[in-house]
Amino acid sequence: MAATVANQVGTREKLLRARGAASKLAQLSTAEKNALLLSIADAIEHRADSILAANCEDVGSSGLEGAMRDRLLLTRPRIQEMAQGVRDVAALPDPIGETLAEWTRPNGLKIRKVRVPLGVVGIIYESRPNVTVDTAVLALKTGNAIVLRGGKEAARSNQELVKIIAGVTGIPEGAIELLDSSTRDSVQELIKARGLVDVIIPRGGAGLIAFVTENSSVPVIETGAGNCHIFVDESADFDMADRIVINAKTQRPSVCNAAEKLLVHENIAGEYVPRIVQKLIDAGVEVRGDDRACRLANNAEIEPASEPDWGEEYLRLCMAVRVVANVNEAIAHINRYSTKHSDSIVTRNESNARQFLRAVDSAAVYWNASTRFTDGAEFGFGAEMGISTQKLHCRGPFALAELTSSKYEIIGSGQIR
């Protein structure tokens, strides 16, 4: 079996097993990997009762409430979605072995650049059991071994899921390793395991990401926090803007692509601010605003926003509203305060939209659409390791292609230099 219960085997032994599994995984054919993935999907469905029982224990002892409890909670429909997500990944093209470029030099050397696995991927994440499945199957599809370090609140759920996945016949021993989540020691060991682990992916709140990036000796790909914005321009269709704002804020407020800030053009603020503030309040959202937004809100229940509000990722039903002079001020505000995740403009003005798309320095920039679409599945990638907000190696939904590196294959006929 590829993994054991987290507290029975030391971290270093698990990392060594993952290192050994990586070379075996890299040799699997696309057909072999897809067959394993389909077996995993079936196993998850067949073991739904045991998954729910483990998750019930986690939820009951977690002490979490609201959005954080919702992240931890599994239900039968969510398990079905989990299994379907595995099948979706199996149906996607396999990037491994893909030829990225090839050419022949004047001396006759034939050079080909091809995709290869990264090797051993370590992921540190908080209490979301679905991440355990998503990341494990993406790693398997791309021939990578994966070392999982989930949140302690989801320990039983993660152990059961890894046990099920690792128990599928044909999964190499060490391919999926789960570290002990009861102590931070396992995080320290993982992020210092240079030579055993090829890349670390921290996925969670800003504090977790900052700790890993500041302390890791293994290369890190950040999956960033989401202080996401929507700018309602002066030419916006109000009905469209309402739908986008309400969806982006309320559809699932605990996730990183939920909108946290609303910017409104001053030429429509007198009409639009009281309208959208009331709709947000009716939807159960706590609303904060700058001075102009508060004055325009028509005595609605809106609190003054302080300077820290503009940079905060709320991850709950809370939104701050600011009135801006034009698209340039909106862009400047976003580039100052955003986490470079996802930001959107609602407008009929194509020139303003194109300027916004070019100038906002974020991983995903939208025109007339909700920020909630920044997601591997919604982009057609099946699932994701997270949303990368940095610029090196990858940016945006971090899925199959981003779990690869490249190498050069050179074929000669006796050439020497």
Image (spheres, rainbow, N blue to C red):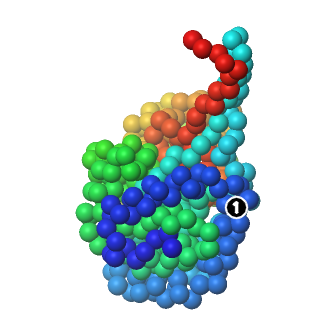
Q: Quadrant of residue 81?
A: bottom right
User: Mark 1 belongs to which amino acid?
Assistant: Glu
Which residue is found at the position 64% from the left and 84% from the top? 46
**Residue 148's image quarter?**
bottom left
Indicate the position of residue 280 as horizontal and vertical percent values. 51, 63
Q: In which quarter of the image is residue 14?
A: bottom left
Residue at 71% over, 66% down: 35
**Which one is in front, 137 or 277?**
137
In this rendering, position of residue 324 left or right of residue 86: left
Pick the residue in front: 135 or 119: 119
Write down the residue under mark 1: 32
Residue 268 visible, this orientation = no
On screen, 186 above or below 74?
Answer: above
Q: Which residue is drawn at 57% across and 11% down?
A: 417
**Can residue 2 be seen here?**
yes
Residue 89, horizontal then vertical, whole percent: 67, 60
